[in-house]
Amino acid sequence: MAPLSLGYLAASLKQLPGVTVRIVDAYGEGLTVAQAADRVLALSPDLLGVSSTSFCFRSGMRLISQAKAKKRDMVAVMGGYHPTTFDYLFLKELAPLDFVIRGEGDESFPELCRRLLQAESIAGLPGLSYRENGQVVRGEPQQIQDLDALPFPARELFTYKGYFHQFGGFRLPPMPRIANVVTSRGCPYHCTFCPKMFPQWRYRMRSAENVFQEILELHNAGFEMAFFQDENFSHDIIRVKKICNLILEHNLPMRFAFQGTIHHLPESVFQLMHKAGFDALFVGIESGSDAQLKRYGKPANSKTLAEGVKRAKKAHMAVIGFFIFGALGETAWDFEATQNFICQTLPHISGGSGLSAHPQAILWEELIGTAEPESLNDS
């Protein structure tokens, strides 16, 4: 999927006078670190921003090191989940790195660029971490309150050549032109394995009207399908119904899929969604064992999840369910309960994986403890 976080940052940066923005999607284009560095250097930027997850942060570090080795006057900034959590370690161990943007960078990153362009002081900038007199200075991140005020992602900077061509390691047949969309930030639930960048931050949604305007722009740009990749698109039933009704009122000929919870959605909402063009849903069922679901902190039990799958299928929506196998504490009975759940509910696609512990997740603290790591090798 297109890296929308970079698309949002690029859209905000484009509003600054005299700023030219380019996106190099190394993951989407299948670039090696060296190839990505060469691509960056060919652009000869004044500033390089790298977004990095917990799974690929070392690649991000190598990219900055290789690029700055050949262009030392370039400012290097990192953002994303892992740098946000361990900013002090990145600044300690990655000498070519100049700044870390913690949390949501929609406002702080463009402001950092503006101040650097104007040679203004960066002191007091929310969410900014940097070195000063041998110490790491950390600005407290601020949560974006009004998501409707953000410009839509700068999708014209994406190639869309390598997106949605595979699923779960399998190559997919030719598909319609698909755009991924994020209509909310955060999640109202507290699953033990799910990382929360700042647990105290609240779940926020864009208005149905704002979401529809983005869908309309996508349609006018030639996209045939939109995938709502929110952590929980379907949480607010009233908003889901408003979005569907707007699509129907304007007779928009697009198809849709979403990611979110389904145990609370009544059959009438599934029927409305399908009528509006929703063909598929992705849901983290995780387990068919109520004991495991309780350990995971899931908001539903096996019965309500099975009923949700049944209602979705009755509305002719494809159900893609994800399950966790081999987790700590999982018994043979738990494993068998999950197998039985899959066989009885028959999701159209069932995907399985092991359990991962991410920084800032409840599971991380249970397994690793609350002590801060001394090195990125321990993170």
Image (cartoon, grey):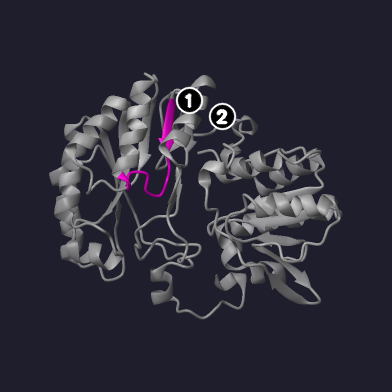
Q: Amino acid at mark 1?
A: Leu
Asked if residue 226 lies in the magenta stretch, the reply is yes
Q: Of residues 306 and 12, which is closer to you in this image?
A: 12
- What secondary structure prevails in the magenta region? loop
The image quarter containing residue 4 is top right
The image quarter containing residue 162 is top right
Which residues are the magenta region?
Answer: 225-236
Residue annotated with mark 2? 161
Across and down, in percent, residue 65 comes to 75, 57
Q: Amino acid at mark 2?
A: Lys
Residue annotated with mark 1? 216
Across and down, in percent, residue 37 comes to 73, 46
Taking the image as shown, residue 109 lies to the left or right of residue 372, namely right
Taking the image as shown, residue 315 lies to the left or right of residue 133, namely left
Across and down, in percent, residue 178 comes to 46, 29
- Which image quarter holds the C terminus? bottom right
Which numbered circle lies on residue 307? none
Q: Of residues 69 and 221, which is closer to you in this image?
A: 221
Q: Residues within 10 Å of mark 2 (few under 14, many from 20)?
A: few
From this view, report whether residue 111 is shown above or below residue 206: below
In three-dimensional space, the C-alpha distance between marks 1 and 2, rounded to whole angstroms, equals 22 Å
Across and down, in percent, residue 75 comes to 79, 54
Observer-side mark, 1 or 2, equals 1
Determine whether the residue tagged by mark 1 lies in a helix, strand or loop.
helix
Residue at 75% x, 43% y: name it.
40
Residue at 14% x, 53% y: name it.
303
